[in-house]
Each structure stands twice: as structure tokens, then as C-alpha cells.
Image (spheres, rainbow, N blue to C red):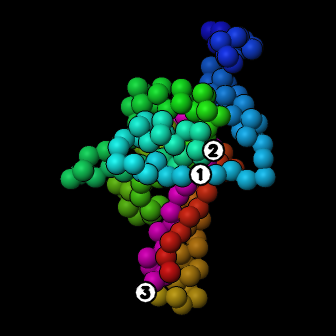
């Protein structure tokens, strides 16, 4: 199967490997933005959906952190194929990248959290995000900071991080953000 990659409605190259265009599209977006810093924002600046926020933020920021959720009482904002197509179009037109904030803290003892995070990665793979942002569950350290507990947490957090990296497929595209005090 031959895939064509376009820039300004011109075929810039043709390749036989599906999926490579997504990577090259991201690389082109990032190359356009080579500067001393990049400005980013979350996807919930305006009280609207992901696409509306991306349209309104395009041209104002270099990266949008897609804050994803899935909750029984509120539903899900995991992107559909139509949403992915719209976000990719906005990104291509504005040299914009996306990062994906995973919906739950990573805790290998919480199967539902792991499942939601894996599905969030799968749902956004078509955007070829600049990075995925994960939280390692540090609540246990809020109650017990003994050397033994810290050592156990480090081991568990390392295994959880390894799982996220395996799902993403590239350690360089995984960021860890923790907010525990």
C-alpha cells in the first residue's frame, strides 16, 4: 500500500509503510516550531469540547495538553475518529502539537485505572502526540514515608512507568507529573 504525505496540497514524498506519515507529520510540526521555548495550554480553557478548544487556542499556543476523562456520572471525552481527524487538521494548519494527559494515576493494583490509561493512549495514537503525561500514584507516601515504604513505592512506580512506556512504545514520549505535596 502506498501512502502519500502532503504539504500545502503537494505530494512531498510517497512511502510504502503505513503510519510513517503520522510520525513525519509530527516531525514537520515540531521543526516549524524550533525556538527557545514552546508555549502550551490545557484543552479545557473554554467550556467546550476538545475540537472547539483546539480551534480557539490554535495560533496562540504551540501545544495543547488534551486532558482526558472517563467517569460514570460525566461520560467520556476520549476522541472519536472524527475528533482525531479534526484535531489533526487543526494541528497541520497551525504547526500545533498535542500532549495527552492520562485520565488516572498509574497504579498496577487498580485494573480500571490501568485500563482507562491504556485506552486513552490507544484512542489518541492517531494524533501521534508529542508526549503522554502520566501520574504515578503517590498517595501511599502521604501516610508513610519510612525508608521501606519509599523503596516499595519506587519499585511499584517503576513497574507502572514501564507499563506506560510499553503502551506508548517510546520512553522519550512519556512524562511523569506528580502533584502530591
How many marks can you see? 3
Q: Earlier in the sequence, mark 1 or mark 2?
A: 1
Write the start and end of the magenta stretch as one range.
125-143
Left or right side of 51 for 150: right
Determine which of the numbered discs, if any, sits on residue 40 in the image.
Answer: 1
Q: Are marks 3 and 2 in contact (CB under 8 Å)?
A: no
Look at the image and tell me in which quarter the N terminus lies: top right
Helix or strand or loop: what does disc 2 sit on? loop
Q: Earlier in the sequence, mark 3 or mark 2?
A: 2
Q: Residue at x 41, y 58 (%)?
A: 104
Task: Choose between 109 and 172: the one closer to the eye.
Answer: 172
Picture quadrant where residue 11 is located = top right
Q: Position of residue 8 (x, y in %)?
A: 67, 16
Where is 152 relative to 132, above or below? below
Picture quadrant where residue 103 is located = bottom left
Q: Would you name the residue on which mark 2 appears?
A: 62
Task: Choose between 42 and 173: the one closer to the eye.
Answer: 42
Q: Position of residue 124 (x, y in %)?
A: 49, 38
Crowding at dot 2, Cα within 10 Å, few <14 / some 14-19 / many 20+, comes out as many
Where is 42 relative to 135, above or below? above
Q: Residue at x 78, y 52 (%)?
A: 36
Q: Would you name the residue on which mark 3 appears?
A: 143
Amino acid at each position: 500500500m502506498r501512502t502519500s504525505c502532503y504539504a500545502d496540497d503537494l505530494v512531498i514524498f510517497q512511502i510504502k509503510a503505513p503510519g510513517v506519515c503520522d510520525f513525519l507529520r509530527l516531525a514537520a510540526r515540531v521543526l516549524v516550531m524550533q525556538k527557545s521555548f514552546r508555549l502550551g495550554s490545557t484543552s479545557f480553557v473554554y467550556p467546550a469540547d476538545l475540537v472547539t478548544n483546539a480551534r480557539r487556542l490554535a495560533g496562540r499556543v504551540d501545544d495543547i495538553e488534551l486532558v482526558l476523562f472517563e467517569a460514570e456520572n460525566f461520560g467520556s471525552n476520549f476522541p472519536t475518529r472524527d475528533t482525531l481527524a479534526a484535531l489533526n487538521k487543526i494541528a497541520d494548519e497551525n504547526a500545533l502539537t498535542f500532549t495527552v494527559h492520562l485520565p488516572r494515576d498509574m497504579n498496577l493494583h487498580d485494573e480500571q485505572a490501568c485500563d482507562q490509561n491504556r485506552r486513552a493512549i490507544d484512542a489518541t495514537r492517531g494524533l501521534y502526540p508529542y508526549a503522554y503525561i502520566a501520574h504515578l500514584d503517590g498517595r501511599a507516601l502521604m501516610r508513610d514515608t519510612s525508608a521501606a515504604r519509599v523503596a516499595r513505592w519506587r519499585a511499584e512506580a517503576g513497574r507502572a512507568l514501564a507499563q506506560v512506556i510499553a503502551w506508548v512504545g517510546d520512553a522519550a514520549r512519556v512524562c511523569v507529573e506528580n502533584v502530591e505535596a
